[in-house]
């Protein structure tokens, strides 16, 4: 079925197709309308910013008025502000760990008192290692043969793990 157009139903594309020339706009953009739009846009932005500034100033002044009023708590023992119970956040954790490690290193590398009344001191760790190698570890005295169960030799008894407190027999 062929389509044909009446002159009464002609479209703008028909003129373009019939002439064979490239199309162009027949009217220019309305510059005055664009300028009016820009002016109204800037004016509304300024009004909005001024209203926001005024609202902010009102909120700040309202907060100051409330803060200046005496807050009364009739059942409270003290009216001052107190910090909540710990633990609190560390303001500068890197500095605190640095200072903590400096204190630890000083305790491990210097002489000092642990308890002056009891005569307990701490010595540098390297000195303690040398003394340990020279003197050896302290040990318990050997158990008497009367404490050993019947039929076992006291020298063959070994302590079990330290948490149980029991002894185990070592069979030959």
Image: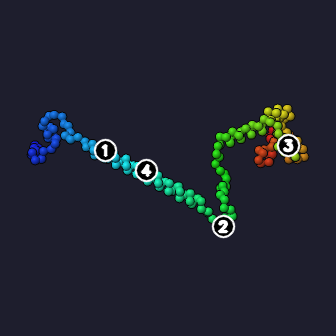
In the depicted structure, whether residue 52 falls above or below residue 156? below
Instruction: State which mark lies toward you, 2 or 3.
Output: 2
User: Of the residues under marks 1 and 2, which one precedes in the sequence?
Assistant: 1
Contact, mark 1 vs mark 3 (Cβ under 8 Å) = no
| Residue bearing the label numbered 1 | 35
Give the label on residue 75, or none: 2
Mark 3: secondary structure: strand
Distance between the Cα atoms at labels 2 and 3? Answer: 51 Å
Marker count (numbered): 4
Q: Is residue 68 left or right of residue 59?
A: right
Residue 70, picture quadrant: bottom right
| Residue bearing the label numbered 3 | 120
Q: Position of residue 26 (x, y in %)?
A: 19, 40
Instruction: State which mark lies toward you, 3 or 4.
Output: 4
User: Of the residues under marks 3 and 4, which one precedes in the sequence?
Assistant: 4
Density class for disc 2 (Cα within 10 Å; few <14, some 14-19, many ≥20) is: few
């Amino acid at each position: 079925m062929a389509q044909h157009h009446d002159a009464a139903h002609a479209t703008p594309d028909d003129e373009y197709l019939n002439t064979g020339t490239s199309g162009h706009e027949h009217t220019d953009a309305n510059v005055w309308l664009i300028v009016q739009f820009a002016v109204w846009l800037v004016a509304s932005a300024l009004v909005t910013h001024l209203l926001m500034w005024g609202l902010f100033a009102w909120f700040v002044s309202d907060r100051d008025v409330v803060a200046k009023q005496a807050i009364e708590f009739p059942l409270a023992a003290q009216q001052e502000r107190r910090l909540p119970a710990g633990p609190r956040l560390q303001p500068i954790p890197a500095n605190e760990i640095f200072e903590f490690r400096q204190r630890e290193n000083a305790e491990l590398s210097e002489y000092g008192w642990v308890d002056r009344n009891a005569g307990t001191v701490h010595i540098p760790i390297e000195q303690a290692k040398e003394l340990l190698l020279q003197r050896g570890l302290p040990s318990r005295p050997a158990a008497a043969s009367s404490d050993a169960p019947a039929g076992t030799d006291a020298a063959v008894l070994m302590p079990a793990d330290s948490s149980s407190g029991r002894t185990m027999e070592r069979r030959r």
